[in-house]
Image (cartoon, helix red, strand yellow):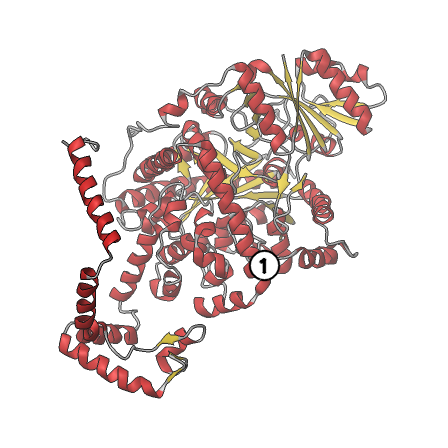
Amino acid sequence: MSAKTAAGTVKERAELALNDEFLRKAVKFTTERLRNGKKNASAEHGNWDEWRERGRQIRLHTIAHLDYYLNLFVENARANGVHVHFADTGADAVKIALEVARRKQAKTVVKSKSMVSEELHLNHALEGIGVEAIETDLGEYIIQLAGETPSHIVIPAIHKNRYQIADLLSEVAGEKLEADTTVLAGFVRKKLRENFLEADIGMTGCNFAIAETGSMVLFENEGNARMVTTLPKTQITLMGMERIIPSFRDLEVMATLLPRSATGQRMTMYMSAITGPRRTEDADGPDEMHIIIVDNGRSLQLGDPEFQELLNCIRCGACLNACPVYRHIGGHAYGGTYSGPIGAVLTPALNKNVAEWDDIANASSLCGACYEACPVKIPLHDMLIYLRRRKVEKGHGNKLEGAGMKGFAAVMGNAKRFRAALKMGQLGQKLVVRDGGIRTKLGPLKGWNSYRVTPSLPKHTFRQSFATLDQEIREGLKEMSPDIRARMEAAVKNRGNAGQGGGHGHG
Amino acid sequence: MGDAAQEHRQWLEQMEAASRAKQASFMDGIARKLKRPRVTEAPAHPLRGAPDFWNAFELTPEERIEKFMSNWQSVGGHPARLADMDAVRKFITDKAKEMGAHYLIRQNEPELAALDLEGALPEAEVSVWNTDADVHWKARSAEADFGVVMADYAAAYTGTVTVLSSKDKGRSVSLLPTVLMIIIPVGRLKTKMGEPLAELDRAGRENLPAGAHFISGPSRSSDIENDLTIGVHGPGIVYALIVG
């Protein structure tokens, strides 16, 4: 996997996103829509936690026996007539895909949404050998025209409004298109129909692969993935090595969890199980089918007790929609192919270079909303802590922060030092306190004071006031008004009676 | 072309040899990372499929029809319940006339042949999938106004229809026409999607079709400003006709 797709730190990229008001609103609106959809769909279906647990168990079981199930899948897919390839790295996968395209003398490749292909930057590589790669998912098509990358795993063009989209499509059409959703989608339908029928190669990702039959399964709403797997003569499927589940019965559980978690749908409009190329007498479907099984850092999680469960991910995007950080900064701020909580963990994990990606592990409030949302219960918030720990262990910690923490420990660990520090603070702050608050953006105060006001230290500490406070409270109790006292005594008496009556049945 | 085809076959064979060689080391690598020897026997998988409470869940035939129809309607599809295949013929011909459909394509199945749409719609052109080797069937489907297919299964709880491909049943027929008519004999309407899925397991690899498609409504997208658009790539108008 190549380096970051966007420059700078997560902080700089988030700053850009936070200053783009449309983006912020669009992300907030979309994620809320999807999140509420998921909540309703899972509540309507009922027993959601039992389904999650079953989904988790199936994924855990498959990954724990991945060598068996992947091997079984490969044998069955081959028996179906599929050409199976293995790619240790993204570069290997690209090489195989390009070789197929060259051998087929392909001019155009139509693609349906595939996160693996984004991970490999395959479109760019295809263009390099003169092959036109066309994204056919409506959202992906739009961002391809804009020359951008997806900002959401399920709704990739979340960050574009219809006027921007109308401008992009008008350029393709050679005439001004109205900024109307139906008009724009209608234009794309017509335009891409020609591409589907003429393309030499169809390229897809893979949501699930069925080990026992060698089938690959795709979930979608538009029908473009069906087009891509039905019309061109050659099909190439890029599949992460962990996409396996044992059987079609297990697929029922995934089909229950995935659409509801992703978009709140009972079911996506299409689910297709493709088992090999077309049969000899069939009149549609590909003549030749390739499946490229991609590792590209996935196997690094195997046998790692802290991160193996990452491979259970079914790429629904529910953690993005639930994440308070993602909802504010959007997908591009994460800088990698995968965004949101899953991206914050997956990107450094796949790349094995914690140092380069350390900052996105900090783009989290550790609230655990991602875990609550996850249909296969991946403890993403715990993993973010593991990542931070590993970063420090590898010596990539922030030196200033480390020194600061040491100093903090030294001061807080000793009452005399703490008192002395407070005294100094109370005296020193006189220089900077205005209207009861500290507003200066000097030194370490900049990060906080850019958007907030630091409260000043009070004149008296809690400890200093404690003797007086204690005295006041004692006096106050003595001076209790007679009716309050009567009520309290009655309450105590009642409590005693209830206990005797055995009302709570603890006897 | 003969030479090129030969050369291509040779290349595929080379790639296959390389893939088989790589396969062992790939799987060994996984086992090594999992810190145990290769697993070569099927492991026990007691938690296969849906939870027990779900497998026991069953709707009555009448509930299934009601549930399927309300689901189909809720995603923008058009459900109808018809008494028999004569009513189906009338329904399709009426719709074809109403919408001005000129080109129809249907799967090559006896139930559909018995509808005699050709006789009922003399001014329209009705094609039967894969009945003439000289026709480009994918293009023929793409230009069709109506596609007419039989459902192999349907599941009420999610409002899903299953269509399986074969030489007589094109995948394109349920995908490329503007309007899709799916006929569901009431006996094929099950409660849960797990039922047709279990059928695929039962059939086993050798007997599976190249394409098994689960359709739950019209093609749709919310990719532009979250605004729902129907009929983005696949059929936007989808009728589910429950018969019997």
Q: Quadrant of the C terminus of chain A?
A: top left
- Image coords of residue A278 (percent x, y): 58, 30
- Above or below, B200 relative to A87: above
Q: Quadrant of the N terminus of chain A?
A: bottom left
Q: Is residue A180 left or right of residue A412?
A: right
Q: Nearer the viewer, residue B76 or B84?
A: B76
Q: Nearer the viewer, residue A449 or B180?
A: A449
Q: Residues within 10 Å of mark 1 (few under 14, many from 20)?
A: few
Q: Chain of mark 1?
A: A
Q: Secondary structure at mark 1?
A: helix
- Above or below, A143 relative to B99: below
- Please tell me which residue is depicted at 61% across the width and 28% down the height of the picture: B72
Residue A450 seen = yes
Q: Is residue B134 left or right of residue A284?
A: right
- Image coords of residue A6 (percent x, y): 50, 65
- Image coords of residue A498 (percent x, y): 20, 35
- Please tell me which residue is depicted at 27% across the width and 80% down the height of the picture: A459
User: Disc 1 designates what residue?
Assistant: A128
Q: Is residue A500 left or right of residue A73?
A: left
- Image coords of residue A342 (percent x, y): 41, 52
Residue A96 seen = no
- Please tell me which residue is depicted at 76% across the width and 33% down the height of the picture: B143
- Please tell me which residue is depicted at 18% across the width and 42% down the height of the picture: A493
Q: Quadrant of residue A388?
A: bottom left
Q: Farthest front residue?
A: A482
